Amino acid sequence: SAVISQKPSRDICQRGTSLTIQCQVDSQVTMMFWYRQQPGQSLTLIATANQGSEATYESGFVIDKFPISRPNLTFSTLTVSNMSPEDSSIYLCSVAALRYGYTFGSGTRLTVV
Amino acid sequence: SQQGEEDPQALSIQEGENATMNCSYKTSINNLQWYRQNSGRGLVHLILIRSNEREKHSGRLRVTLDTSKKSSSLLITASRAADTASYFCATSTQGAQKLVFGQGTRLTINP
């Protein structure tokens, strides 16, 4: 299955600033997924990142707040913009491995102060 | 919105005992998967069961799927302290690769 390198692993940010999270996959994949996990909660899909086209956002998530780039088939970034304490969460990227389930990055633990 | 509901939300057992977690979902699925998460880190894929399968085994794990009841269970036999983690079920539907996660069960194995 694919191996994902996600960084940063954690960060503490000031409110009003932005943070860009990177995910690098060791093989080419068609779709990459970005999830948010709020403290003590389950994972919620933010958007699906497609190479060569705009990301597809889930209800409740907008591009202005969570812009996503997908410049090639092995790389994607998620930016959390104009952060507030409510954005404090773990953010995870994921790729589908079809027969073997999905592979997840190790997560980015974001704290906004 | 979350499709799956899991119970119990938290489970604490003694090492060596079996642990059973349940997951229910609302719509027709293509497959159901179980994941483990240690200490809020990345998720580890445990097992995938397709909609036309009823039971699957992998080592100490046993998963069942009842599509008529829209439910699944994960059994961990002979639990170990290292099994302490949160466990999530996740479903995917036909034609959609995205996963929808359940609320998760926090499992604690006491030595």
Image: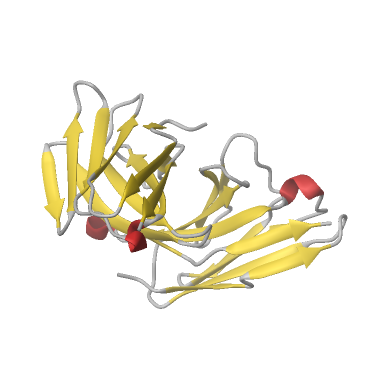
Q: Is residue B104 shown left or right of residue B111?
A: right
Residue closest to the eye, A52 or B14: B14
Residue closest to the eye, A90 or A34: A90
Q: Is residue B47 shown left or right of residue A104?
A: left
Looking at the rendering, which quadrant does residue B53 occupy?
top left
- Residue at image x 43%, y 41%? B104
Looking at the rendering, which quadrant does residue B88 occupy?
top left
Residue closest to the eye, B64 or A6: B64
- Residue at image x 64%, y 67%? A21
Q: Is residue A87 shown left or right of residue B9?
A: right
Image spot of residue B107 (x, y percent) = 39, 47
Q: Is residue A28 shown left or right of residue B16?
A: right
Vertical placement of B49 versus B3: above or below? below
Which color mode does the image show?
Answer: secondary structure
Vertical placement of A109 versus B67: above or below? below
Vertical placement of B24 versus A21: above or below? above
Does residue A2 appear anywhere in the picture? yes
For the C terminus of chain B, the image quarter is bottom left
Looking at the rendering, which quadrant does residue A3 occupy?
bottom left
Residue most toward the bottom?
A26
- Residue at image x 40%, y 44%? B99
Vertical placement of B45 versus B12: above or below? below
Image spot of residue B90 (x, y percent) = 36, 42
- Residue at image x 35%, y 71%? A2
Does residue A31 appear anywhere in the picture? no
